Amino acid sequence: MTQPTAGTFDPHDRALFTDRYELAMLQGYYESGHTPTATFSLYFRDLPAERGYAIAAGLEQVIDYVETLAFDDRALDYLAEEGFDAEFLSYLDAFEFTGEIRALPEGTLVFPNEPLLEVTAPIHEAQLFETFVLNQVGFQTLVATKGARMADVVRRHGDGQDLVDFGSRRAHGTDAGLTAARAAYIGGFDGTSNMLAGERYGIPTYGTMAHSWVQSFESERASFAAFADVYGDDAIYLVDTYDTITGAGRAVTVAADRDVDLGGVRLDSGDLTALSKQVREIVDDASIVVSSGVDEFFLREFFDDDGVASAFGPGTALTTSADAPNSGVVYKLTAVERDGTLAPSMKLSPGKVTYPGQKALHRVERDGQYQYDVLARRDEALEAGAPQLEPIFEDGSLVYTPPELATIRQRASRELEALPERCRHVSEPDPYEVRISDRLKAVTQQTEGEIRDREL
């Protein structure tokens, strides 16, 4: 009988966290002796709906994956049962990465067609990374961007309110809950409700109480009194179990009876904007935490309608990126070795045409504001702007020191402040300009022509 698990995987499982066709191709590459050097690029064809930008995230998990990837006896035994050849499994037993990775540092803005990372290695090495890289970078970039959109609305329209991730219970799995908390913090959130995310990533943790606490006592007043006796001045009371206005009044009364300061109240249902203003009149200057249905669109309307809050607890909308749950990130081969030289390669599939070859990406800034990006061939000498891609691995060795999460968060904040506000609107943002160099255009046209002549 198979033993039950918690639905997570540890480092020993990582080698098998891949699609079967990756391993099928690896075996094919190995047995046919077809192992040219190749470059794969991870990028957005288009940004998700209503996004004027994305915030790169997930690189640290990719680094850890590359550093620790190994096929142990359990993985090899399973692959043998699945029909993979013994000689190929011997190769996997000794697998190690020997190539190069360049990437955008986490917290960096990224736009369509720009590489989040590029992997250059023997094709059977680079191919294997596809599933994990798409999973981690695609998802975390999606959530970091969602979080950044909320943080930007608070920054531009609010009064410094805190944002706390309440979404791990709604995330699509335990790993998603953890990495969503990390990504949201990169995007500008101030904390998380998830204790493991706090322990693992050093993110501040916050929490109040649930409706079950209130319901378990014989009265709402009794539940508040018990909470006040335990937490004193720090108690935040969930006041909407029965009636928000009545509950807010009871919280004030109980705090006074217990001779403690009213730490705050949380509103979790109803017309939250209208209720927040009524509750402010009751609780004076105590904190008001607003949760339930919070996202960037809610926040914009909340502030436009003069809602009152000290903090917000977005949940489902954050960890699932509910309005745009698919990042659309792809991992595509853009160059492959021919006669000892990396030759540009591309797809011609309708709607899926790629820019071929290794890339350079420069960002042009003027007076503290980003003006445009230039996407070019890697070997071009660009004078305009600052290069964005950094070396992560060289000859299979890590040459990059991942920064602290707080530093990544600060980077994302600075990046967003430098992006023109018209590109940061939560609805119908203006597209940021990404210029394609003349040489990259020419190589694209030439490569497409060569492929058509050869294949069509």
Image (cartoon, grey):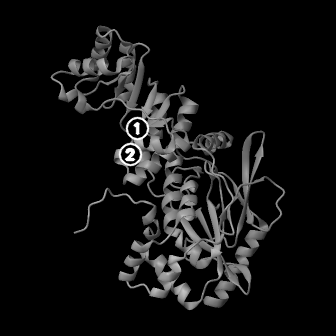
Residue 396 image position (x, y, % from top left)? 65, 68
Front-most of residues 352 and 140: 140
Residue 339 in view (yes/no): yes
Question: How would you rate the neighbour count of disc 1 (Cα within 10 Å): few for under 14, some for 14-19, many for 20 or more?
Answer: many
Is 298 drawn above or below residue 127 in the view shown?
above
Instruction: Mark 2 or mark 1: name the one nearer the start of the chain.
Output: 2
Tag 2, which secondary structure?
helix
Is 244 drawn above or below residue 175 in the view shown?
above
User: Which residue carries the number 1 mark?
Assistant: 193
Classify the position of the N terminus by image quarter.
bottom left
Q: Is residue 428 left or right of residue 289?
A: right
Q: Amino acid at mark 2?
A: Ser
User: Which residue carries the number 2 mark?
Assistant: 168
Residue 446 image position (x, y, % from top left)? 73, 79
Residue 49 in view (yes/no): no
* Measured Cα–Cα span from mark 2 to mark 1: 8 Å
Is 147 drawn above or below residue 46 in the view shown?
above
Tag 1, which secondary structure?
loop
Q: Residue at x 58, y 44 (%)?
A: 405
Residue 5 image position (x, y, % from top left)? 30, 59
Q: Is residue 448 left or right of residue 249?
A: right
Classify the position of the C terminus by image quarter.
bottom right
Q: In the rendered structure, are the residues bearing label 2 and label 1 in contact, judged by CB atoms less than 8 Å apart? A: yes
Front-most of residues 421 and 143: 143
Front-most of residues 328 and 297: 328
Residue 407 image position (x, y, % from top left)? 63, 41
Is 333 drawn above or below residue 194 in the view shown?
below
Q: Is residue 304 left or right of residue 60?
A: left
Quarter of the rendering containing residue 281: top left
Q: Amino acid at mark 1?
A: Ser
